[in-house]
Image: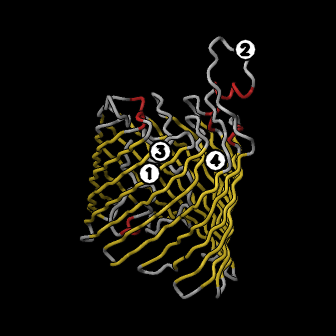
Amino acid sequence: MVFPFNVWAQSFTDTGIFSFTGSHNPLRRPIFREFLPEKGLKVGRVQLHPFVGVAEILTDNAFRTNTQRRSDTLTTIAPGIQAYVPFGGGKHSFLLDYRAAQLLYRKFTQNNVFAQHVVGHASFNFPGGLKIDLQGGNVDGFDPRGSNLDSRNKNITKWRTTNFLGQARLSGPRGSIRLRTRYARRHYKNNGQDASRDRTNAKADLTGFLNVTQAISGLLGESISNNDYDENKQIDSFSYGFFTGLALAPNRRLSGEVRVGVTILNFDRAPIEAVDPAPVPPAPLDKGNRLLNEGLSLGGKQQRRFTLRGNINWRPTTQRSINVRPFRLIRQSGVANTSTFVQTGVSLQGSQKFTNRFGLRAGFRYSNNKFSASRTDNRFRWNIGLNYRTVQWLGFMVNYYFAKRTSTDSQFKFYSNTISVSAQAFF
């Protein structure tokens, strides 16, 4: 698949150059939707922001395969609207945000897919430094071709996630404390993926911040997470972790957070031992063998891993911005007879504004993925593109994308080249 739309983009003013919204690469892990700080359309106390993006894309590897590569062109249409209502004298607010994307391929219509994301985000600012954010919503998404967990079926694998996010932060003169919670329920709609991958996840982390200087704070925290699978019970799990790091107070040049720690993941049940196929027709299957035949995971032993999360924003000048995100995480997969994989890498994004209308964007991402089923992938992706805004509400973008994956399992290797021409109207 290709990525003509930037899911994380919020508005023109975020980067000083034109950027794209939409849900082409759907959000697997929801984020708090933020208010678009443009004038928009006023309807009483409600501030509306309708927007729409369109793109024409050419790729030389529509299925992200190592052999029998096939080229194709597709059209993406991505509409959306945001409604923002301040109340309580402007201290509190409610935001309703809807974004969608329809992908239409010319030749290989089995790649056609519709994605959408709708959320409601309530924000409360109370006296004494207490801020609370609550958000709930749904994502109708899919596993893009060539993604880490692409099931490689003929048709795109589709899913729906119902999620809730909560965050409370109490700030004082010497520091602050933050509690984050997340609930997510995921259901797979096709390709027989529901048995192995339908699940519920509940997660929370508590972090304390101590101000070292006006710009730097030390942090210390603990996280817990629970995965409950509907049928693939062998990989039900509970994990906990401890972390420390630094937080940078937002300013005109530098902001962000880096944390390092240890995560311990425990499976609720002992792993099932794999058995060789019987040389003669087998007797009625017991539960363990039935799990194997249905393609469910075998479970796993305790995982204890060093983990890293970072998100650093640097604006050396008013014309230039750079974002760096290092990561090392334990992921649960529930696909291809695996239970977990460890993902290590870094993401770099940069933009350069040449004039008020014209700018450049570039990005690079590398990740090393070690799966529990003796498979290791190395993924590379980079892109470069030019942005041009004709008027305040209309802009265009031309992008080139290169993606490559090497793997110890040859069926997962691929590389692809993609060119997209896009336009977006934002009101």
Q: CA distance from mark 2 to mark 4?
A: 41 Å
User: Mark 1 or 2 closer to N-term?
Assistant: 1
The residue closer to the viewer here, 153 or 387, is 153
Mark 1 residue element: loop
Q: Is residue 111 left or right of residue 180?
A: left
Point out residue 268 in the picture as x, y percentages from the top left corner. 75, 45
Q: Amino acid at mark 4?
A: Thr
Q: Residues within 10 Å of mark 1 (few under 14, many from 20)?
A: many
Residues at discs 3 and 1 in contact (Cβ within 8 Å): no
Q: Residues within 10 Å of mark 4 (few under 14, many from 20)?
A: some
Q: Residue at x 59, y 70 (%)?
A: 86
Q: Quadrant of residue 391?
A: bottom left
Mark 2 residue element: loop
Q: State the mark number for residue 376.
A: 3
User: Mark 4 or 1 closer to N-term?
Assistant: 1
Mark 4, residue position = 162
From what the image shows, is residue 278 above or below residue 352?
above
From what the image shows, is residue 43 above or below residue 332?
below
Residues at discs 2 and 4 in contact (Cβ within 8 Å): no
Q: State the mark number for residue 22.
A: 1
Mark 3 residue element: strand
Q: CA distance from mark 3 to mark 4?
A: 31 Å
Q: Residues within 10 Å of mark 3 (few under 14, many from 20)?
A: some
The residue closer to the viewer here, 168 or 242, is 242
Q: Is residue 403 left or right of residue 175?
A: left
Q: CA distance from mark 1 to mark 2?
A: 52 Å
Q: Is residue 127 left or right of residue 328?
A: right
Q: State the mark number for residue 208.
A: none
Mark 2, residue position = 283
